[in-house]
Image (cartoon, rainbow, N blue to C red):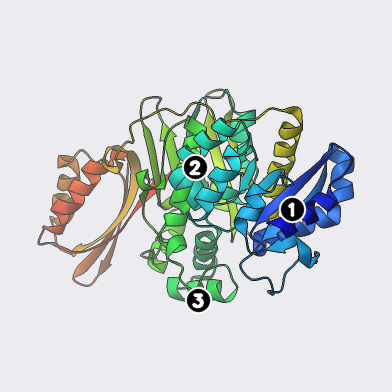
């Protein structure tokens, strides 16, 4: 660590307003943050009274091309050199994953260094351990960029709405799936074709599973529930469904009924239990979330006093994510200079409500034999399970009738029981997608 320590020491400012940043990683996000700090140090100092300096950067490959032009002597392969250096004031983690990020973050916090991260996987799975390490070290752990990129959501929940009783947080927190669903809606394209386009444009990874099957959004939903409700929620508590089974017929049916399909993260609390889930949802065109297009993110908050709020912006990309992280860096720097910290607060052990015990309106499609009496039998099964039909449309296709239902709000368990019985009915030939519905 000696060379890095000597270099950083030589860069120390005489002013107490200088805060030295140690970066773990210099990829898309880390490089963008380093570029902003290097290019805008004077402007940031003029606006905040704090001068930020890059003290060192840990990378895997010292010879790789970078988006930022910095002296080679700042770079090291030794992550612990950044964490342990007495000349690093704030650590920024951008390497991703759980290990070695978890240990590096914990070591930094326990040594009295605030940490900024955009690592949703880390916070969603071992957040409680990190929060405790931050409290032990008496420093900040900030993760604004972990949920919605450049959208200042976590800060609003932690600060502006700290005293508000939030009942529901609901939003589009994955830009890849929103891009895919937007294209399917507006162009009538097939899922597979749009996914390939998203991959070619860089919106989707070569292996898109985390996005399209909902696990990325589930990690973000866990973080949202933790902050909004003061609850201990991890990614494994979140029920998840992805969009890979959504067809252009489902998209067309939703449009016909005045809705669009979005992959939503939904976190709800009644004060006694917390329910957190991710799934495709039919959203009324009158709802603000329906207008969120392409790779943008938006989160809709419902509070007891403030009412409804929506935050909207770019949810990914080096620039927006680095911008959110820079805000966290400045907040941590101010607190560090003042000798204070902003902890997460006391987290409670709220029971997690199973998906079977949640309620929603539902959309479903059935293909049945087109003959007298079949519709009455189907409607009777809905009634037997306490599921009330709000609307129904029927189209004849020769010997088969295509039925489209939207229910009133019903218990998930009752709807699933209805479907199980319908599958065993000899008159039912096929059951299509089951999609939850929110009104305007």
Mark 1 residue element = helix
If you read the primary sequence from the N terminus, does the residue marked by circle 1 or circle 2 appear first? 1
Residue 316, position as x, y percentages in the image = 61, 57
Residue 440 visible in the picture = no
Q: Is residue 17 left or right of residue 153?
A: right
Q: Nearer the viewer, residue 343 or 202?
A: 343
Graded by Cα atoms within 10 Å as few (under 14), some (14 to 19) or many (20 or more), the crowding at tag 1 reads: many
Residue 376, position as x, y percentages in the image = 16, 50
Residue 375, position as x, y percentages in the image = 18, 54
Q: CA distance from mark 1 to mark 3?
A: 47 Å
Q: Is residue 85 left or right of residue 289?
A: right
Which residue is tagged 2? 223
Q: Which circle, 2 or 3, is nearer the viewer?
A: 2
Residue 380, position as x, y percentages in the image = 15, 45
Task: Tell me the residue at 30%/43% (across/down).
Answer: 355
- Above or below residue 323? Residue 200 is below
Graded by Cα atoms within 10 Å as few (under 14), some (14 to 19) or many (20 or more), the crowding at tag 2 reads: many
Q: Nearer the viewer, residue 169 or 128?
A: 128
Q: Is residue 440 left or right of residue 85?
A: left
If you read the primary sequence from the N terminus, does the residue marked by circle 1 or circle 3 appear first? 1
Which residue is tagged 1? 5
Number of numbered discs visible in the structure rendering: 3
Which residue is tagged 3? 196
Q: Which quadrant of the view contains residue 15?
A: top right
Residue 362 visible in the picture = yes
- Above or below residue 163? Residue 422 is below
Q: Nearer the viewer, residue 340 or 166?
A: 340
Q: Which quadrant of the view contains residue 67?
A: bottom right
Q: Which circle, 1 or 3, is nearer the viewer?
A: 1
The answer to whether the residues at label 1 and label 2 have Cβ atoms under 8 Å apart is: no
Q: Which quadrant of the view contains residue 274?
A: top left
Q: Nearer the viewer, residue 427 or 300?
A: 300
């Amino acid at each position: 660590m000696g060379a890095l320590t000597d270099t950083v020491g030589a860069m120390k400012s005489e002013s107490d307003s200088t805060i030295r940043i140690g970066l773990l990683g210099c990829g898309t996000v880390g490089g963008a943050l380093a570029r902003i700090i290097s290019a805008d140090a004077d402007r940031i100092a003029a606006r905040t009274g704090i001068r930020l300096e890059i003290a060192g950067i840990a990378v895997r490959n010292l010879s790789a091309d970078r988006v930022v032009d910095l002296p080679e002597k700042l770079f090291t392969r030794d992550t612990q050199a950044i964490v342990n250096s007495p000349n690093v004031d704030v650590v920024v983690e951008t390497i991703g994953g759980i290990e070695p990020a978890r240990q590096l973050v914990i070591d930094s916090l326990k040594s009295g260094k605030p940490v900024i991260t955009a690592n949703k996987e880390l916070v969603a799975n071992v957040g409680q351990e990190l929060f405790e390490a931050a409290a032990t070290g008496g420093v900040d752990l900030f993760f604004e960029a972990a949920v919605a990129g450049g959208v200042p959501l976590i800060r609003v929940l932690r600060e502006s709405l700290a005293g508000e009783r939030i009942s529901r947080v609901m939003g589009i927190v994955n830009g890849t799936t929103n891009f895919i669903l937007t294209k399917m809606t507006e162009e009538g394209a097939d899922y597979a074709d749009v996914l390939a386009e998203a991959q070619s444009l860089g919106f989707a990874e070569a292996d898109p599973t985390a996005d399209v099957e909902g696990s990325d959004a589930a990690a973000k939903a866990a973080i949202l529930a933790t902050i909004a409700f003061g609850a201990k929620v991890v990614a494994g508590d979140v029920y998840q469904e992805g969009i890979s089974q959504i067809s252009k017929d489902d998209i067309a049916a939703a449009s016909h009924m005045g809705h669009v399909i979005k992959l939503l993260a939904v976190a709800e609390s009644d004060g006694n239990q917390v329910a957190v889930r991710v799934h495709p949802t039919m959203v009324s065109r009158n709802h603000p979330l329906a207008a969120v297009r392409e790779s943008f993110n938006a989160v809709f908050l419902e509070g007891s006093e403030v009412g409804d709020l929506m935050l909207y912006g770019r949810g990914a990309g080096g620039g927006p994510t680095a911008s959110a992280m820079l805000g966290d860096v400045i907040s941590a720097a101010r607190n560090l200079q003042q000798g204070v910290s902003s902890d997460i607060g006391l987290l409670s052990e709220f029971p997690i409500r199973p998906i079977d015990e949640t309620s929603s309106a539902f959309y479903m499609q059935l293909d049945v034999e087109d003959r007298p009496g079949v519709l009455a039998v189907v409607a009777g099964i809905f009634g037997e399970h306490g599921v009330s039909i709000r609307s129904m449309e029927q189209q004849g296709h020769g010997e088969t009738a295509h039925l489209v239902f939207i229910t009133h709000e019903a218990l998930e368990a009752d709807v699933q029981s209805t479907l199980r019985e319908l599958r065993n009915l000899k008159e039912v030939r096929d059951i299509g997608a089951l999609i939850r519905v929110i009104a305007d």
